[in-house]
């Protein structure tokens, strides 16, 4: 693997040793599918958008959100990934642009958010499993299965990036198939579900709540950047993969909902989990079972892909001396196995905390890290105008400033909407601010203890 170049705090170039031997790397479509799972995981989770906005506005939201939220992010990732295809991705960009402190904060925000986010997917896996086999909902059986999901994903990741990519590819086809069938069957049931009821809607999601859910369903594009050193020809592959993944995710959301609109099933009948009931109405019990199994595959695939992404952050930080060098140890498949194991244990310990999906909190913490990435994009244009950029955001400095404007406006909107969700007796906005301040404290503690001596080469 070629050496990666960074800029030390005094501005002089600093070349890291080539810690990793050449290994199998991801090509375009495996990267697209990995990104799909890091962002979406399929059509599941869109029900509340239909419930809150109705079919027409739901489709409009799902069309506009990727344009004003995902596409600017994809442009930013395309430029920075092609210019700086380093392991750690967004952490490496922010550190190079603004130094150790802000690089540390970028990684902190992502890993802190993962405590909440990664507990969701094994829980969803159990929710779908108990729909098929209620026996697993008794006692501690569900928790045991959730821990098994975490362990299985850790093992797959330790086996290598190619194993994760192959698993993701098969899961993508298996979970997408029932939605393709629903899309086709819905066209043959035009108007026939006007009086049908799936189950009573227990939640109320308004139009703005539907927009927040859409933002949540379309966020996470930068997660794919952390594996840049393991991607074949990243300068060419990343921009193409980002645009292909945006189109794939948008199509997976919009097409089934557009098809269901012709059935005239009432939007009021939609809520989280309604896709299983809809599959039963259109295709009978077998299609319903397949869709529930697809939900399990979606949850497993998202957790598996995100382990791949998050585990590269401690690895890159250890290389830079911000974490102990043990986190950069590699196995014979070039996987930072210590990072995988430590994070997996941490996530497993959080499974019993009962975190609910706090959409606003996720968006706020993710948005803070995304803001740093857009700032890094602008700063690097000023500080390193001659840095080779195989792909560039068009429009010069004005273009890179404007490209981040729409996502930041959406984040400001979510900030004003964030006071209604509560966790530990405070609003999700207050919790988000505490997480940010905790990152400052963590960096100060790290500095007080001293920078971790040595790089991973001495610990291998």
Image (cartoon, rainbow, N blue to C red):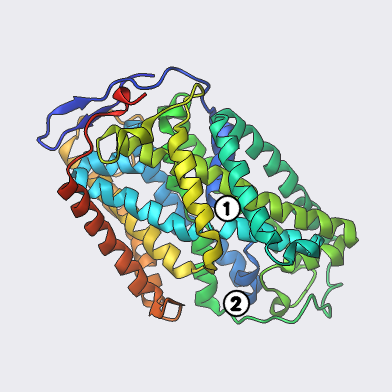
* Mark 1 crowdedness (10 Å alpha carbons): few <14, some 14-19, many ≥20: many
Q: Nearer the viewer, residue 403 or 96?
A: 96
Which quarter of the picture shows residue 327?
top left
- Of the numbered discs 2 and 1, the one sitting upstream in the chain is 1
Q: Is residue 286 left or right of residue 149?
A: right
Residue designated by label 1? 40
Residue lying furthest front? 139
Image x and y of residue 200, in percent: 74, 82
- Evaluate if marks 2 and 1 touch, with contact meaning CB atoms under 8 Å apart: no
Report the residue at 60% width, 34% height from top: 165
| Residue 52 marker | 2
Q: Is residue 169 left or right of residue 27?
A: right
Image quarter hosting the C terminus: top left
Q: Nearer the viewer, residue 191 or 278?
A: 278
Residue lying furthest left? 10
Q: Secondary structure at mark 1?
A: loop
Q: Is residue 160 visible?
A: yes
Image x and y of residue 288, in percent: 83, 60
Report the residue at 63% width, 55% height from top: 146
Q: Is residue 64 visible?
A: no
Foreground: disc 2 or disc 1: 1
| Residue 109 marker | none
Residue 440 vs 14, above or below: the answer is below
Image x and y of residue 410, in percent: 39, 66
């Amino acid at each position: 693997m070629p050496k990666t170049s960074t800029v030390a705090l005094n501005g002089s170039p600093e070349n890291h040793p080539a810690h990793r031997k050449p290994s199998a790397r991801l090509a375009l479509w495996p990267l697209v599918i990995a990104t799909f799972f890091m962002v979406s995981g399929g059509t599941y989770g869109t029900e509340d958008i239909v419930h809150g906005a109705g079919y027409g506005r739901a489709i409009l939201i799902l069309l506009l959100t990727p344009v004003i939220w995902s596409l600017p992010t994809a442009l930013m990732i395309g430029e920075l990934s092609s210019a700086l295809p380093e392991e750690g991705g967004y952490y490496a960009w922010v550190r190079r642009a603004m130094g150790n402190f802000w690089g540390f904060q970028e990684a902190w925000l992502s890993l802190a958010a993962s405590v909440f986010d990664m507990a969701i997917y094994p829980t969803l896996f159990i929710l779908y499993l108990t729909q098929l086999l209620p026996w697993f909902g008794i006692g501690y059986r569900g928790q045991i299965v959730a821990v098994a999901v975490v362990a299985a994903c850790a093992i797959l990741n330790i086996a290598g990036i190619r194993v994760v990519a192959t698993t993701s590819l098969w899961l993508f086809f298996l979970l997408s198939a029932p939605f393709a069938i629903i899309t086709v069957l819905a066209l043959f049931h035009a108007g026939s579900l006007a009086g049908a009821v799936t189950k009573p809607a227990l939640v109320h999601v308004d139009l703005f709540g539907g927009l927040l859910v859409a933002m949540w369903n379309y966020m996470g594009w930068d997660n794919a950047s952390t594996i840049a050193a393991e991607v074949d020809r990243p300068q060419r592959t990343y921009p193409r993969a980002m645009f292909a993944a945006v189109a794939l995710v948008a199509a997976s959301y919009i097409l089934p909902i557009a098809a269901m609109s012709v059935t005239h099933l009432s939007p009021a009948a939609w809520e989280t989990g309604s896709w299983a009931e809809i599959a039963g109405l259109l295709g009978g019990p077998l299609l319903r079972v397949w869709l529930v199994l697809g939900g399990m595959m979606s949850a497993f695939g998202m957790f598996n892909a995100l382990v791949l992404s998050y585990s590269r952050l401690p690895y890159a930080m250890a290389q830079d001396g911000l974490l102990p060098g043990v986190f950069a140890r590699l196995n014979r498949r070039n996987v930072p196995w210590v990072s995988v194991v430590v994070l997996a244990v941490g996530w497993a310990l959080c499974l019993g905390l009962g975190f609910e999906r706090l959409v606003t909190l996720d968006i706020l913490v993710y948005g803070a890290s995304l803001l740093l990435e857009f700032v890094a994009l602008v700063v690097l244009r000023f500080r390193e105008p001659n840095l080779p950029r195989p792909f560039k955001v068009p429009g010069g400095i004005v273009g890179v400033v404007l490209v981040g404007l729409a996502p930041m406006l959406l984040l400001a909107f979510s900030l004003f909407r964030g006071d209604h969700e509560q966790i530990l007796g405070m609003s999700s906005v207050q919790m988000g601010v505490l997480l940010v301040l905790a990152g400052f404290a963590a960096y100060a503690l790290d500095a007080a203890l001293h920078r971790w001596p040595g790089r991973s080469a001495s610990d291998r």
